[in-house]
Image (cartoon, rainbow, N blue to C red):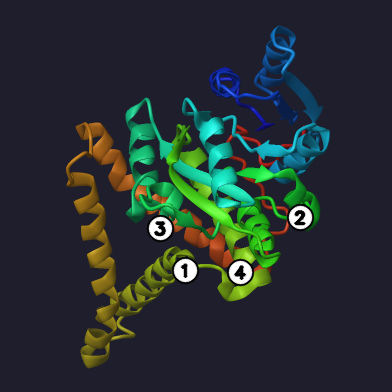
Amino acid sequence: MPVLNERAYLEHAVASVLAQELDGPAELVLALGPSSDGTTELAHRLAATDDRIRLVENPAAHIPVGLNAAIRASRYSTIVRVDAHSELSPGYAERALRTLERTGAANVGGVMHAEGRAPFQKSVARLYNSPVGLGGGAYHGGAHEGEAESAYLGVMRRAVLDEVGLFDESIRRGEDWELNLRIRQAGHLVWFDPKLSVTYWPRESWLRLARQFRATGAWRGELVRRFGRRNGLRFFAPPALVLLLALAIVVGVLQLTGVLSGIASLIASVVYVPLALYVLLVVAVALSPGGGSIRQRLWTLVVLPTMHLSWGVGFLAGVLRGAHDTVDASRLGTRNTPLP
């Protein structure tokens, strides 16, 4: 479990891991980044109360670096990746191990079920669980078990990780997708089991959400630079929306200044049609059954475009110039880097 500034979530996440019932021995390795909110002190207190918890340092604060440090320090033949912002459902690890055995897969993942507390977070969670929000990947609500492109978090065979190499430390977001690509290229199976469920707690504010999605989009753009069409078509929808919006703004300015007029202006106005349809889609999602309270529905009108546009802007930047040192600063307050 890579950990950075997770004081509000760490204890529950750790408890959900330690509550897993397994026949054999198990341990929880926490890779501690340079937190500034008391998370590191909390982790040390938790480790002092249970000898199954082990601590390693992750001074770089990057997720794949922390994951690799924890994997190298681990002692058992199966690696269960967990997240400090999530909680494993009861029986998760036991069922995952059975699925590994039954299918012969190298990596098994399940459903990421987002939950929220305040109206904003509930709105984000609802969109996480919707194909309209995050593009319909199986782990966002798929119901059919089978071979998969990637796995959320992942329960992995250590021998396969040693064979293909661990996480690529040059990739700071989307590292799981890239690892699963190498696993599949090596001839191994990645498997989705919808009966495996992990509760995920999204970001709690608009700024943090926008930062998270911009960084994630930038790294998906970087992965497109590296791996091209191996990336699914759904990843190209948000950047297409951004480009369409930019084109509409240009057309609007040209129309207002009189540069475009007459038939040319009428033809150019076609660009507004898909944007109008998108606005209707956002409104329909906000008003649809299960939308929650009025405040939650109003937040949906803001959250859905924020997710799509932030991700799309990041994606375009990542494709055009690479992700470089882009980090997810969404858990770092006003700081732009996780390093002290």
- Provide the secondary structure element on which disc 2 rests: loop
In this rendering, is residue 15 above or below 313? above
Q: Which residue is mark 3?
A: 135
Q: Which residue is mark 1?
A: 236
In this rendering, is residue 260 above or below 129? below
How far apart are the alpha carbons under marks 4 and 1? Answer: 10 Å
- Residue 170 has which mark? 2
Q: Are discs 3 and 1 less than 8 Å apart at CB?
A: no
Instruction: Answer with mark 4 or mark 1, whichever residue precedes in sequence.
Output: 4
Q: Are discs 2 and 3 less than 8 Å apart at CB?
A: no
**Badge 2 local density, few (<14 within 10 Å), some, or many (20+)?**
few
Which residue is situated farthest in the front direction here? 102
Q: Residue at x 24, y 50 (%)?
A: 285
Q: Are discs 4 and 3 less than 8 Å apart at CB?
A: no
**Badge 1 local density, few (<14 within 10 Å), some, or many (20+)?**
some
Q: Nearer the viewer, residue 12 or 207?
A: 12
- Provide the secondary structure element on which disc 4 rests: helix
How far apart are the alpha carbons under marks 3 and 1? Answer: 10 Å
State the image quarter where residue 229 is shown. Answer: bottom right
